[in-house]
Amino acid sequence: GAGVSQSPSNKVTEKGKDVELRCDPISGHTALYWYRQRLGQGLEFLIYFQGNSAPDKSGLPSDRFSAERTGESVSTLTIQRTQQEDSAVYLCASSFRSRYLSARADTQYFGPGTRLTVL
Amino acid sequence: AQSVTQPDIHITVSEGASLELRCNYSYGATPYLFWYVQSPGQGLQLLLKYFSGDTLVQGIKGFEAEFKRSQSSFNLRKPSVHWSDAAEYFCAVGTTYSGGGADGLTFGKGTHLIIQP
């Protein structure tokens, strides 16, 4: 089966414009995660979905950031009124989240990312 | 809140030599621990993970890591590196899944591995 896919792979936008980033998780994975990776930095956790519910949005950097997910499939991360500091690679991951501890649970599989450049 | 420290930003190793990448974590309970590798232009690939049980974990590409609770460490090792191992390596910690909580992984800032011929 296919891995996690993200689109677009690259996005260049002007400051102040809105952007939408898309993530298609691995089929059957109930959990979906968004991360941001700034140049030379580790990954910064943004938000998590279990199904289409996001229990904790406190990782989103500002109210310009929002995310939604349709069922247990596609998710979109929207950044409104983009700023230059939003320039980063945005990574999506998915996992099979089980109630029980198992070797399958909570291993996150990452997509290739979307490189966002805000001019 | 949990945290991860990778003390070495860059490491240079000769091809064929052994490798150890350091990772220290901070978390009050039993953590989930991961090592991921990121090659240029590639996504993150899982090398290995520790959830419970045997503290020496074997991964892909000949890598292994040892969980040492007393030192809060999860160092990555490989007995003999290959030029293709040149990449960025990330250690990450996840909190113990309670069945009700939800959170992402906390990553270290990464170690850039350079292989000398």
Image (cartoon, grey):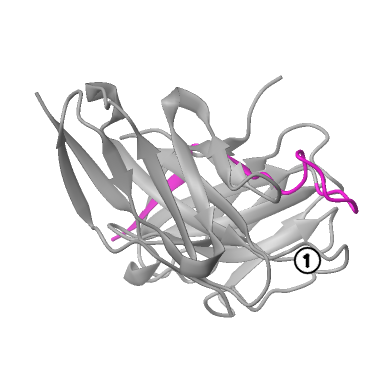
- The x, y position of residue B17, in whole percent, is 20, 30
Dominant SS in magenta: loop
- The x, y position of residue A87, in whole percent, is 36, 61
- The x, y position of residue A40, in whole percent, is 28, 57
Query: Which residue is disc 1 drawn over?
Result: A54
Mark 1 residue element: loop
- Magenta stretch: give its range: A97-119
Quadrant in the picture for residue B88: top left
Quadrant in the picture for residue B77: top left
> Is residue B28 left or right of B41 when viewed as pictured?
right
- The x, y position of residue B39, in whole percent, is 34, 34
Q: Chain of mark 1?
A: A
The residue drawn where x is 28% and y is 26% is: B80
Farthest residue, direction left: B117
> Is residue A110 left or right of A83 when viewed as pictured?
right
Residue B112 shows in this picture: yes
Q: Tell me which amino acid carries mark 1.
A: Ala
Identify the image quadrant of the N terminus of chain A: top right
Identify the image quadrant of the C terminus of chain A: bottom left
**Foreground: B66 or B105?**
B66
**Foreground: A11 or A40?**
A40
Residue A11 sits above or below residue B60 on the image? below
The residue drawn where x is 73% and y is 74% is: A56
